[in-house]
Image (tube, rainbow, N blue to C red):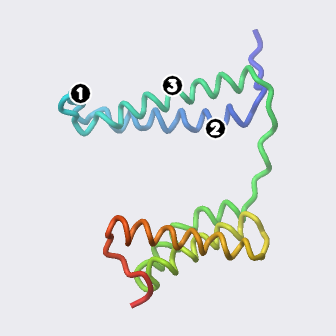
Amino acid sequence: MKLAIRNPLDVMSGSFLLIVGISALYFGKDLNFGSMARMGPGFMPRVVGVCIVVLSALVVLRGLRVTGEMPPSFQLVPFLSIVLAPVLFAILIKPAGLFITAFAVFSLVRVACTKQFSVEAFLAPFILAVVVCAIFIGLLGQPLPLFWY
């Protein structure tokens, strides 16, 4: 029986998630599991790890059975924007405040992924920044400055 990969995207993403699930199980193995009544620190890593392993195995099996499309080619700019967004957040959060930081991070990701400068490229990050500020400062009461000091 020859094993043919019919959907490489499912096989690759399922394999990645399989590694994540196995890692969760490995790093949580020394933690006390506890019981359902008194969950220990190892309870969630193991339960989530098992769920991820099972679901990722199903995704890999689906990729071997169902025909799908090839994964898109690697694009450096969107990849770097996603990787650099948390770095930008860490650099800006203290001096610029939550609103400016959220707007800058969302703008970076939006422009890098769509490669267009339009009203939507400005409006979507603005609305998301307002929502983030409303949630973290208004609803959750986090002691973050809204704007710079």
Residue appearing at x 74%, y 33% in the figure: 8
Callout in the foreground (2, 1): 1
Quadrant location of the C terminus in the rendered image: bottom left
Observer-nearest of 5 and 52:
52
Furthest residue in direction left, as rendered: 38
Residue 36: image tag: 1
Image quadrant where residue 47 sits:
top left
- Report which residue position mark 2 lands on: 13
Per the image, the residue denoted by label 3 is: 54
**Quick one: label 2, few (<14), some, or many (20+) residues within 10 Å?**
some
Give the Cα separation between the discs numbered 2 and 3.
Answer: 13 Å
Task: Compute the Cα span from label 1 to label 3.
Answer: 21 Å
Q: Which amino acid does label 2 sit on?
A: Ser
Question: Is mark 1 in CB contact (under 8 Å) with mark 3?
Answer: no
Q: Residue at x 52, y 73 (%)?
A: 130
**Above/below status of 101 relative to 132:** below
| Residue 34 x %, y % | 20, 30
Which tag, 2 or 3, sits closer to the chain's start? 2
Tag 1, which secondary structure? loop
Query: Quick one: label 1 or label 3, which is nearer the N terminus?
Result: 1
Residue 20 position within the rendered picture, expressed as x and y whole percent measured from the top left: 49, 39
Q: Hey, what amino acid is under mark 1?
A: Met
Horizontally, residue 44 falls left or right of residue 17, namely left
Mark 1, mark 3: which one is toward the viewer? 1
Tell me if 33 is positioned left or right of 13 in this view.
left
